[in-house]
């Protein structure tokens, strides 16, 4: 593929607004302090301070290893999903830059979040708007499918008496929601359904058309197009899941990503003297993560910590200790990603130049290795 001329629009998406970044980080810090204050009122400041004094620093160092595994796993999965069914074959350097910037984008105050960075990378690598959208949706659908599967397995173990007692509602919710979503996804991802819904298209009114009717017609056309892309994305997930040997990096990569991230939370708990059963850890992590990933400013500072803390409390962790572990965990998953994001920002222009030259698999149906 011929090299395209670089324009300012190639990197505008990833530009960092210093004021926005400082404001976001300041708000997140303030919300975190408020969250600690709220927990202190509910629990006991003395017990929290005692837990801090007795913390084992070695576990904080070990927690970083979980994030290394998480990054490696995500990069492997990113490359595998990118190249599936004839997509661009990103090398590790390109995928690593994209993942590093995407993980830190929403905290740094970039004009784009992680999903937009993924779309930019794939579109710049030669995918059409619709194909890039479908591949991004497939990436995130598969990511959540792996986490949901782990949480469902943990819930089944708990209900079978092979794990510690946890709230019945939490276990049943995972046992109902994930299988139901999987069944629905399996139906919509069949070839005939992808062929039927994936090609839905509605003409938009011309740009010169004004008024509420034209606005509504444009909104409807975009919604129909997004629905078709969503179905196409689910179809791509089915293609990879049914061919695990052809696409080993997709599922294995995301499994490593989630397990690495969970290990960081486990190490944060161990630092404060808490050791959770694996099934309870997975359930607490997955339940808290549903809130943690909401697209709120600065990584949902404050609210996310509270959500994870109460999820840990549901499985028996004292509330004060849970909030301390949650904040330690969030340091690694929200604040630490700023470092690689900043380090890789100077390489973004080079990435914009490299992506148009990304090769494709020899066969459209192959190319799924790690």
Image (cartoon, rainbow, N blue to C red):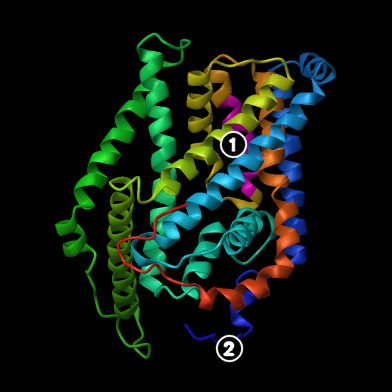
In this image, 8 relative to 22: left or right?
Answer: left
Q: Let me know if residue 168 appears in the view.
A: no
Q: Judging from the image, what secondary structure is the residue with disc 1 in?
A: helix
Name the residue tied to disc 2: 5
- Which residue ends up furthest to the bottom in the rendered image? 208
In the rendered structure, which segment of residues is drawn in magenta?
Answer: 299-310
Foreground residue among 302 and 338 = 338
Relative to residue 306, is residue 320 depicted above or below? above
Foreground residue among 247 and 219 = 247
Q: Residue 52 is drawn in which quadrant?
A: top right
Structural crowding at the residue carrying mark 1, measured as other residues with C-alpha within 10 Å and reported as few (<14), some (14–19) or many (≥20): many
Residue displayed at 71% across by 65% down: 345
In this image, 161 relative to 95: left or right?
Answer: left
Name the residue tied to disc 1: 261
- In the image, residue 155 lies at what x, y percent? 39, 21
- Which residue ends up furthest to the right in the rendered image? 53
Q: Let me know if residue 329 appears in the view.
A: yes
Q: Is residue 300 magenta?
A: yes
Residue displayed at 70% across by 69% down: 347
User: Magenta segment, principal secondary structure?
Assistant: helix
Relative to residue 189, is residue 18 depicted above or below? below
Q: Earlier in the sequence, mark 1 or mark 2?
A: 2
Relative to residue 60, is residue 156 depicted above or below? above
């Amino acid at each position: 593929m011929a090299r395209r001329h670089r324009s300012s629009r190639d990197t505008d998406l990833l530009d960092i607004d210093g004021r926005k970044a400082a404001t976001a980080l300041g708000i997140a810090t303030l919300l975190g302090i408020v969250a600690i204050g709220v927990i202190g009122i509910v629990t006991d400041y003395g017990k929290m301070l005692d837990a801090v004094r007795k913390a084992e620093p070695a576990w904080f160092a070990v927690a970083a290893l979980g994030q290394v595994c998480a990054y490696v796993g995500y990069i492997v999965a990113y490359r595998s999903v990118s190249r599936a069914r004839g997509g661009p074959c990103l090398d590790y350097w390109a995928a690593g830059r994209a993942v590093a910037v995407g993980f830190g984008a929403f905290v740094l105050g970039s004009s784009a979040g992680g999903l937009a960075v993924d779309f930019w990378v794939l579109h710049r690598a030669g995918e059409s708007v619709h194909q890039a959208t479908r591949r991004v949706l497939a990436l995130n659908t598969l990511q959540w499918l792996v986490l949901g599967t782990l949480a469902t397995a943990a819930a089944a173990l708990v209900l079978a008496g092979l794990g510690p007692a946890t709230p019945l509602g939490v276990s049943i919710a995972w046992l109902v929601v994930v299988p139901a979503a999987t069944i629905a996804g399996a139906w919509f991802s069949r070839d005939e359904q992808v062929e039927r819904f994936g090609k839905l298209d509605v003409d938009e009114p011309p740009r010169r058309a004004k008024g509420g009717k034209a606005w509504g017609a444009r909104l409807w056309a975009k919604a129909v197009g997004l629905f078709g892309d969503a179905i196409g994305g689910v179809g791509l997930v089915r293609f990879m899941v049914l061919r695990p040997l052809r696409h080993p990096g997709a599922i294995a990569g995301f499994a490593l990503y989630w397990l690495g991230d969970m290990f960081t939370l486990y190490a944060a708990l161990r630092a404060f003297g808490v050791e959770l059963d694996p099934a309870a850890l997975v359930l607490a992590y997955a339940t808290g993560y549903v809130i943690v990933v909401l697209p709120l400013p600065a990584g949902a500072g404050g609210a996310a910590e509270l959500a994870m803390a109460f999820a840990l409390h549901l499985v028996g962790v004292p509330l004060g200790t849970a909030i301390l572990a949650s904040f330690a965990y969030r340091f690694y998953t929200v604040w630490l990603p700023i470092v690689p994001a900043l380090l890789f920002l100077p390489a973004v222009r080079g990435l914009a130049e490299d992506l148009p030259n990304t090769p494709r698999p020899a066969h459209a149906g192959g190319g799924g290795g790690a």
